Image: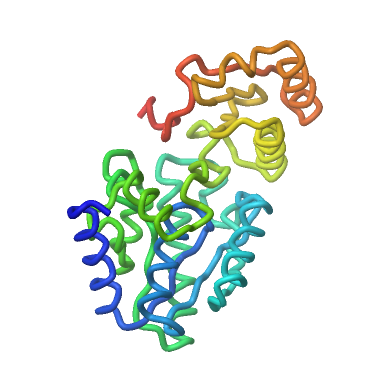
């Protein structure tokens, strides 16, 4: 391990140790899996993982989160947190993520206090400071700790450390809640969340690595890595994707020529 990265890793462990005990908001993604593993290594049974269950969180992600905690014998609670019941959330305002995170972390703090755990932690990293992330305002307001950002760890560094720790998520594609696929101002519904979920699952099943299916009314805008453009344009794959997405409820199916990138819905802000 490089000296600078080793130092960041030790700073992370020391920071978590000083917390004494923690609830970790755990989605099963790259960042929160790494954070949970390190927190459990340092704090042992003074750590609890909490995963939010909602219609914007695919079942495949929930299953992976449950399996990880079971394998590593980490205490795990599944918290019901239905974003669509939050006032104003369905209308998909530009502060949608703030509304969701504020409600979720309030619930997690209740769990932490009930269990006698001193802190709540979440897995945002240094790269998140470079995008529009209104959820981080809720993190700040509610006193939630962000150990990975504190340690100055980037996504690439977290993947490198995860690989050294032999975590299965070290090369897992990035994921964000399905509500992030909607254009700001477009109403979020259970039906459309299901359309997006099925469309992305299809692409994953077809072997695409990093995917997003953005929804514009009933138009699907597919984002994949540019290196996989040719694969999507193969006649059998292209026709399968088109016909399946139509069966899910999409009227038209398009491919974004810029390919996958995080926060593409924020480009209009």
Which residue is pictured at 43% across the width and 75% down the height? Answer: 40
Pick the quarter of the image with the C terminus.
Answer: top left
In the image, residue 224 above or below residue 121: above
Q: Position of residue 138 (x, y in %)?
A: 35, 59
- Farthest residue, direction front: 1
Whether residue 8 sits left or right of residue 182 in the image: it is left
Q: Position of residue 157 (x, y in %)?
A: 32, 48
Q: Quadrant of residue 196?
A: top right
Count of numbered badges drawn on the protein: 0
Q: Position of residue 210 (x, y in %)?
A: 54, 34
Which residue is pictured at 44% across the width and 49% down the height? Answer: 97
Image colouring = rainbow
In the image, residue 133 above or below residue 225: below
Q: Position of residue 183 (x, y in %)?
A: 51, 31
Which residue is pictured at 40% across the width and 75% down the height? Answer: 41
Q: Nearer the viewer, residue 218 or 65?
A: 65
In the image, residue 72 above or below residue 135: below
Q: Nearer the viewer, residue 198 or 269?
A: 198
Q: Quadrant of residue 37?
A: bottom left
Which residue is pictured at 27% across the width and 45% down the height? Answer: 129
Q: Quadrant of residue 90?
A: top right
């Amino acid at each position: 391990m490089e000296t600078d990265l080793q130092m960041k890793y030790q700073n992370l462990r020391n920071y978590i140790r000083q917390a004494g005990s923690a609830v970790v908001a755990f989605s099963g993604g790259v960042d929160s899996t790494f954070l949970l593993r390190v927190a459990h290594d340092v704090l042992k049974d003074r750590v609890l993982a909490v995963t939010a269950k909602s219609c914007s969180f695919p079942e495949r992600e929930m299953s992976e989160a449950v399996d990880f905690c079971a394998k590593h014998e980490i205490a795990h609670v599944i918290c019901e947190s239905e974003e669509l019941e939050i006032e104003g959330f369905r209308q998909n305002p530009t502060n949608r993520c703030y509304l969701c995170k504020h409600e979720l972390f309030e619930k997690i703090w209740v769990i932490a206090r009930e269990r006698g755990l001193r802190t709540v932690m979440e897995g945002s990293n240094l790269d998140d400071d470079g995008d529009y992330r209104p959820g981080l305002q809720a993190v700040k307001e509610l006193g939630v700790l962000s150990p990975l950002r504190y340690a100055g760890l980037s996504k690439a560094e977290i993947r490198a450390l995860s690989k050294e720790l032999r975590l299965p998520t070290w090369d897992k594609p990035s994921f964000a809640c399905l509500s992030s696929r909607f254009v700001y101002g477009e109403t979020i519904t259970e039906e459309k969340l299901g359309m997006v979920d099925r469309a992305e699952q299809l692409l994953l099943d077809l072997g695409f690595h990093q995917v997003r299916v953005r929804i514009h009314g009933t138009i699907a805008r597919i984002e994949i890595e540019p290196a996989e453009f040719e694969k999507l344009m193969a006649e059998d794959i292209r026709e399968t994707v088109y016909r399946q997405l139509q069966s899910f409820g999409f009227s038209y199916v398009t491919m974004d020529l810029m390919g996958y990138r995080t926060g593409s819905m924020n480009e209009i802000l």
